[in-house]
Image (cartoon, rainbow, N blue to C red):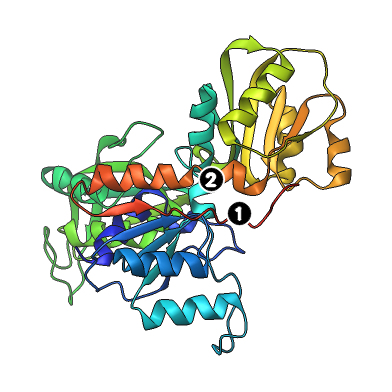
Amino acid sequence: MKLQKLINQLEIFAPIAYQESYDNAGLIVGDATNELTKALICFDVTEEVIEEAKSIGANLIISHHPIIFSGLKKLNGKNYIERIVISAIKNDIALYAMHTNLDNIINGTNKILSDKLGLKNQQILAPTKERFRKLVTFCPSAHIDTIRKAIFDAGAGHIGNYDQCSFNILGQGSFRAGENTKAFVGKKGELHFEDEIRFETIFPDYLESKIINALVKAHPYEEVAYDIYKLDNQSMQIGAGIVGELDNKEDELTFLKRLKEITQAACIRYTRLRNKPIKRVAICGGSGAFLINKAKASGADIYITGDVKYHEYFDAEQQLIIADIGHYESEQFTKELLISYIKEKFPTFAVQISDMNTNPINYL
């Protein structure tokens, strides 16, 4: 299997367009046309992980964190990042990262911890806005099925768990073909009226070029009329964090102990208990202090994240418990998520999770 085939599938699951502006997800090192032998999945790419990949014959490493965040001006091995990149190139090992694009989908980083905690009715904690566009186009009635299929195949028409969503209405279009035209219907120099379907559908902004190309290719007219509208809708499938509910209320310390056991966290740093049971739980893996107010607004009883700074704990204001379980601990299950997805899509492809614990933090 070519690397590009796997990349295409991974980016259907977690589109690169959903990464944050500071991020560097995607193919970092390697040639997408290369044939894959085996893939190794890890949390961070370290020199030990590179050696592990070599030892098992893997020529692809898929990590959660990118090895490169900012630009490299030299490659002379003066730090671990440069040494890893040099080693990967020398050994023909591709490096691919799925970071905030995986964090920002409802079935991504935060879902797997939510599932392990038994949360129901899961929703995005901070949904994104202005990521959708509406396409409106017009075509002869006899060609609507072909055009509709082409647009849906290009990725349009998804609303939540529904696909192939559109609105269609019959109307009448008019035009007059000029002397240098090759009109599909009508005569040059004469006003023509044609029974047409007005077709409307929604699509994510990053697919705009692909969808317009599909429309133009499938449409019989020489000049294709269409409109693109920017929508202000929130996306309940895209955004940061997750909030959900337990089937039954739990005592605060009982829940915290269960959280510690599930994540194998060496310690949990948390704010003052409120002497109220835990029912509604908000989660953001990684550095999630920026969502504390969103977690409070959601009515969560506890907010689970990592990398909370001292003064940020005061923001709990006894409205909820902030529980910092650690950056690695809150996102570690991305490895399970990715291997499960890849095995589902490519059952015969050789892929395994790294044996390396790449958490750089130790506790005494």
In the rendered view, does 324 fall on the left or right side of 66?
right
Asked whether residue 156 appears in the rendered view, the answer is: no
Quadrant of residue 325 in the image? top right
Residue at which label 2 appears: 332
Quick one: label 1, few (<14), some, or many (20+) residues within 10 Å?
A: few
Type of amino acid under label 1: Asn
Q: Is residue 247 above or below residue 149?
A: above
Q: Residue at x 18, y 50 (%)?
A: 348
Please provide percent x and percent y for residue 359.
Answer: 60, 54
- The nearer-to-camera label among 1 and 2 is 1
Q: Determine the residue positioned at 71% across, 26% down.
A: 302
Residue located 37% across and 55% down the image: 11
**First along the sequence among labels 1 and 2:** 2
Residue 132 at x, y percent in the picture: 47, 47
Q: Dividing the picture into quarters, in which one does residue 247 lie?
A: top right
Residue found at the very far top of the displayed protein: 248
Q: Is residue 32 above or below residue 19?
A: below
Q: The residue tagged with tag 1: helix, strand or loop?
A: loop
Q: Position of residue 248 (x, y in %)?
A: 59, 9
Residue 268's tag is none
Q: Nearer the viewer, residue 186 or 212?
A: 212
Three-letter amino acid code at the position of disc 2: Gln
Left or right of residue 236: residue 250: right
Of residues 364 and 336, which is closer to you in this image?
A: 364
Q: Residues within 10 Å of mark 2 (few under 14, many from 20)?
A: many
Q: Quadrant of residue 59?
A: bottom left
Query: Please, what secondary structure does the residue beneath circle 2 have?
Result: loop
Residue 105 in sight: yes
Foreground residue, 2 or 84? 84
Q: Are marks 1 and 2 in contact (CB under 8 Å)?
A: yes
Residue placed under numbered mark 1 in the picture: 359
| Observer-nearest of 216 and 211 | 211
